[in-house]
Amino acid sequence: MVAEGLRDGVEALADRLGANRQRGRIRGIGDVWSSLCVILGYQIHFRTLRQPVRILFAVLTLLAMSVAFAQEPEEQGEQPIEYLLYAGEPVDNFRMPKLVRWEVVGRYSVVVWPRVSEAYLLTVEPPCFDLESTDELSLNSKAGIVSRKFDSVLIRRGKCRINGIRPIDYKKFLADRKEAREEPGS
């Protein structure tokens, strides 16, 4: 939520700066800072601040802008190729008696096994902080059914809403991996 608000503020700042740049009004970081203050509703004039405070505000402004854009995924379609080859058409939900196993396979992707021979590729909405480095993962579900858009992947630092569910033909996946290992030269 904070990142979205910051991103909206940065986009408004970029629009304002773009208009000012076309008119030849941008002369430095002071103009960037004053534009940001106007958008945020503050009445702080950059030129009235002392030099160390100016530097601090300039650094904080640039840091806030970089954080806002760093949280935006470069490719929202980022998917794990290995499992994607065996993924079926998207479904709205699946039965989850218990979580047998899970494997994080991408920045916004995780494979879960509700049974030993059944797997699903889940994609979550960005931003989902620390999904790739989590050591704990669970799913919230209602009555043992996991649904896209309603349920979430729970990790240590929060929850990430599920926006895609694709069943994986896990038996074919295992058979192809076994065949690849048995081929000479592999």
Image: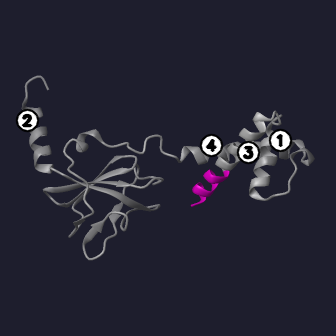
Secondary structure under tag 1 reads: helix
The answer to whether the residues at label 2 and label 3 have Cβ atoms under 8 Å apart is no
Please state which amino acid type lies under the numbered disc 4: Ser
Residue, x 48% and y 45% (percent of image)?
73
Cα–Cα span, label 4 and label 3: 18 Å
Disc nearer the start of the sequence (3/1) = 3
Q: How far separated are the C-alphas under marks 4 and 1?
A: 18 Å
The quarter of the picture where residue 29 lies is: top right
State how far apart marks 1 and 2 are (Cα).
64 Å
Q: Identify the image quadrant of the N terminus.
A: bottom right
Q: Amino acid at mark 3?
A: Arg
Residue kind at label 1, given as amino acid type = Gly
Q: Residues within 10 Å of mark 2 (few under 14, many from 20)?
A: few
For the C terminus, give its image quadrant.
top left
Element marked by disc 4 = helix
Neighbor class of circle 3 (other Cα within 10 Å; few <14, some 14-19, many 20+) is: some
Q: Earlier in the sequence, mark 2 or mark 3?
A: 3
Mark before the other along the chain sequence, 4 or 3: 3
Q: Which numbered marker is on residue 66?
A: 4
| Residue drawn at point x = 45 percent, y = 54 percent | 128
Q: Which residue is mark 1?
A: 30
Residue range highlighted in magenta:
1-9
Q: Is residue 162 in the magenta section? A: no
Q: Height in image: 151 above or below 38?
A: below
